[in-house]
Image (spheres, grey):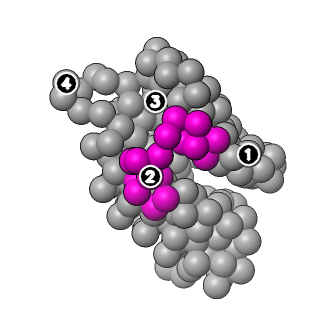
Amino acid sequence: MSNEATGALNARSTGADAGNLGYLALGLTLLAYGLLSTGIFSGTAVGNSAHLAHIVGGLTLFIAGLWQLRGGEGFTGTAFTSLGAFWATWSTASGAGKNAAGLFLLLWALLALTLTAASWNAGLFSRVVYGLLTVSLVLSAIATFSTTAGLAKTAGWIAAASGLAAWYWATASLTNGAWGREVLPVK
């Protein structure tokens, strides 16, 4: 998400950019998935985030991505549609074996790595969101292959941190655009 496209530093957003919607959806989905993966809430597990991941992460991200692609935003369009597909698929893959699930996570970590590399010059938040997502997916894949609960919890905390960064980024962009000045720092 470029500063020009998001309105993070611009006085007013045109309203035609779905970047904020996409980053809010990504942030909230990663926060839910990450926190539920850590086990800090008793009686919850990753599976409890499946419905949220499907609707908010899958559907909303996919729509925001199509909106971005239509508006000529190739990076965020690609990021949101592909991550929307990831969350929609992940939310329905509860019966997959550990090797299939681990491979799935590892392959999507490659996508996250591609997004990290492609967004490197876009600023700190871009590197943080996609970099932490990459690390979280790699650790989740390893934890799934080896059924290591401690590593899965670590991956959950990293996913939550990535989600928090995405949520803050979108919140700052919306707030700064609405106020016409930088109220929340984005650098």
Q: Please check the rendered image and state whether residue 132 is part of the magenta-colored stretch, yes or no.
A: no
Q: Nearer the viewer, residue 39 or 164?
A: 39
Find the distance from the CA under tag 1 to the CA under tag 2: 19 Å
Q: State which tag comes first along the sequence, 1 or 2.
A: 2
Numbered tag placed on residue 156 in the rendering: 3
Which of the two discs, 4 and 2, labels the residue nearer the N terminus? 4
Going from the N terminus, do you reach mark 1 or mark 4 first?
4
Within-10-Å neighbours for mark 3: few <14, some 14–19, many 20+: many
Asked whether the residues under the numbered discs 3 and 2 touch, taking CB atoms below 8 Å apart as contact, a structural biologist would say: no
Residue type, numbered disc 3: Gly
Q: Residue 186 at x, y = what percent?
A: 59, 46
- Gap between marks 1 and 4 measured at Cα: 32 Å
* Residue 136 visible from this viewpoint: no
Q: Provide residue 96's location: percent of width, then percent of height.
A: 47, 46
Percent of width and height locating residue 57: 43, 58
For label 2, the residue is 93
Identify the element where label 3 is drawn: helix
